[in-house]
Amino acid sequence: MTFVPNSSSARDIAHHMHPYTNLKAHETEGPLVITGGKGVHVFDEDGKDYIEAMAGLWSVSLGFNEKRLVDAAIKQMKELPYYHTFTHKSHLPSIDLAEKLKSVAPVDMSKVIFQNSGSEANDTVVKLIWYFWNAQNKPEKKKIISRIKGYHGVTVASASLTGLPNNHRDFDLPIANILHADCPHYYRFGLEGESEEEFATRMADNLEKLILKEGPETVGAFIAEPIMGAGGVIVPPKTYFEKIQAVLKKYDVLLCADEVICGFWRTGNYWGSQTFGLKPDILSCAKALSSSYLPISAVMVNERVYQACVTESEKIGVFGHGYTYSGHPVAAAVALETLKIYEERDMGAHVAKVGAILQKGFAAFASHPLIGEVRGTGLIGAMEMVQDKKTRAAFDPKLGVGAKFAKIAQKNGLIVRAIGDSVATCPPLIITEEEIGEMLSRYTKTLDEVAAQLKADGVSFG
C-alpha cells in the first residue's frame, strides 16, 4: 500500500501504536481514519459512509452526534472543569450520578465508586474483593473465578480475569489467585443429546467441583458478564445463572456482574442482570454510561461489601484507592445527561421494538451455508461461520474467515467485529427500523461475497 507523504495514514503509521492491532501488518495496511459521525453512521477522510454496527467498541449508545451530551460537557466545563473526590472532597455531578445509579441498580446497592474505564472498574473490583475478605478475617479467601472466553479488561488484574489466551500470552498473565471456569457456550461445548438445561447443570456442577478442589475457604468471588461480549457474544444457556448462583451462595462466594457491555438497555432491560436473573454483590459498568462521549466507569457495591470497606479503612486510617479522574465532573455530567435521555426517549421500549427486528433478521442468516449458529438478544448479536453445519466443524484458523468478513464488510460500508470466525454486532441503541434493514442488507452482501471468495479459493463449506 502506497501512502502520500504526510497523509494522515502515513503519520499514523509513523507515530501511533494501536491497541488490538497486528503492529507489523499495520505498518503496511495503515488505519481507516474516521473524521466524523452522525447517528449510527461514521465517515472516513474521503467522505465514505459506514454503518457503525459495533457502536464503536460496544459503547456509543446514543450515536455519534448527540448535541445534548456535547452541551452538557460544555456547560460543566464552564462551571467546574475538574475537581477530585479524594480526602472528603466532592462535587455535585459525582453526587448526582452516584445517587442516580443506585436508584436504577438491579438489586439494592449501598455505594458507588467511580473510575475511567471498564478495565479500571474491574481492576477495582479485584481490589475490593481482596479488601473485603481481609476485613472478614479470611485472608486466604482470595481466589476469583472468571470464565474461559470471558472479557473483563486489559489492566494487569482485569486482563488476568479475561479468559482469552492472546490477552495473556507474553504479558506473563494471569496473575496468582485467578481461576477460569468453563465457557458456557452450549453450541460449542454441549454434549450430544444434552439439553440446554442439562448443559447448565453440568456447568454448575463443574463450578462446584472447581471450588471444592481449590478449597471453598480460598475462593472469594465469581465474576461474569450476563452475555459474554468480546468472547463471541455468548448467551447463557437456560437456567445457567440460577444454578451458578446456587453454588456461589452455598460456599459464600461473592457474585460480581460485569455490566460494561450489557448495561444500559443493551439486552432489552436496563441491566443484563435483569435479563438473566443475576443478583450481584458488586456490579461494574462503563461504555454506555456516557455513550462513550467521555471516559467514565462505576462500581456499585452492596451494604455488606461497603461495611467491610468501612471497617478496614477505619483500621488502616484510609481507604487507599482511587484515581485522579475518579468521578470527573465533566464526565459525570455527560453520564447524567445520557441517563436522562434514556428515560425521556423510553429506550427500553425502543430496544424491545428494534431489537426484535434485528434478532429476526439475524435468525434468517442461520439458513446461509456459511452460518452455523446465530445468537443474541436485544441489540447485541453474533453469527458464527463454520465449515460444516452438520458437524459444527470450524474453518482452519489459517484461512482467517472472520477477518475476511470484517474486511469485505468494511468495503461494503459496514463496520463489524470479527471474533475468530464469529461476527459480532452491537449497533447504537438509537438505530431505526430502516437502518437495521440497511445494515442487514450490507451483512447479506458481505456474506455472499465471502462465500464466493472461499469457493474461488477452493474451500468447501456448508
Image (spheres, rainbow, N blue to C red):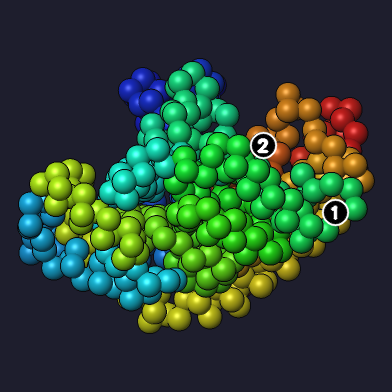
Residue 357 against residue 320 in the figure, above or below: below
Report the front residue among 397 and 369.
397
Image quarter of the C terminus: top right
Report the front residue among 461 and 244.
244
Residue 439 against residue 384 in the figure, above or below: below
Q: Earlier in the sequence, mark 2 or mark 1?
A: 1
Whole-percent x, y for residue 363 in the image: 76, 62
Whole-percent x, y for residue 166 in the image: 55, 28
Whole-percent x, y for residue 436 in the image: 62, 65
Residue 34 against residue 273 in the figure, above or below: above
Q: Residue at x 20, y 56 (%)?
A: 310
- Name the residue that disc number 1 marks: 194
Q: CA distance from mark 2 to mark 1?
A: 25 Å
Instruction: For marks 2 and 1, give the one nearer the viewer.
Output: 1
Residue 427 visible in image: no
* SS at circle 2: loop
Whole-percent x, y for residue 216 in the image: 52, 44
Q: Are marks 2 and 1 in contact (CB under 8 Å)?
A: no
